[in-house]
Image (cartoon, rainbow, N blue to C red):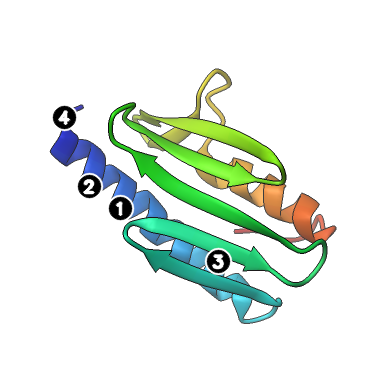
Amino acid sequence: MDEKEFQSSAEQAIGELEEAFSALADDRDIDVEVEGGVLTVTFEEGEPGKFIVSPNSAARQLWVSARVSSFKFDPGSDGFVLAGSGEPLRDVMTRLVRDQLGDQTVVL
């Protein structure tokens, strides 16, 4: 994957997450912002905290910082997947949000 393809894929993935988190923000006390291609989600509800999703062009990965952990996602045939396990980005983010909010019914 070249730089242009990576940037396009990363922008699409971050845009989709922004939409999902924005829809969640309609019902929950969270703030969603994209600046410079980096998605920041700030939680006031549940345990206060922040999720940051940023592209790392040099590594051709999406990096996620959430819940005192970091995750690296590689490009896959159907979007970004967790390095090592192959779990899709959206599934990992849903799991992290559920843990953050203490609500296992949340779906991104």
Label 3 – label 2 distance at C-alpha: 20 Å
The residue carrying pointer 1 sits among few (fewer than 14), some (14 to 19) or many (20 or more) residues within 10 Å by Cα, namely some
Dot 3 falls on a residue whose secondary structure is helix
Tell me which label, 3 or 2, sits earlier in the chain: 2
For mark 1, what is the residue?
11
Label 1 – label 3 distance at C-alpha: 15 Å
Label 2 – label 1 distance at C-alpha: 5 Å
Disc 4 + disc 3, Cβ < 8 Å? no
Q: Quadrant of the C terminus?
A: bottom right
Q: Give the residue type that dot 3 points to.
A: Phe
For mark 3, what is the residue?
21
Q: Give the residue type that dot 1 points to.
A: Glu
Picture disc at residue 2: 4
Which of these two is toward me, 72 or 15? 72
Label 4 – label 2 distance at C-alpha: 10 Å
Tell me which label, 4 or 2, sits earlier in the chain: 4
Where does the image place residue 44, in percent across and percent down from the top left? 74, 72
Label 4 – label 3 distance at C-alpha: 28 Å
Residue 72 in the image: above or below residue 8: above
Residue 84 in the image: above or below residue 48: above
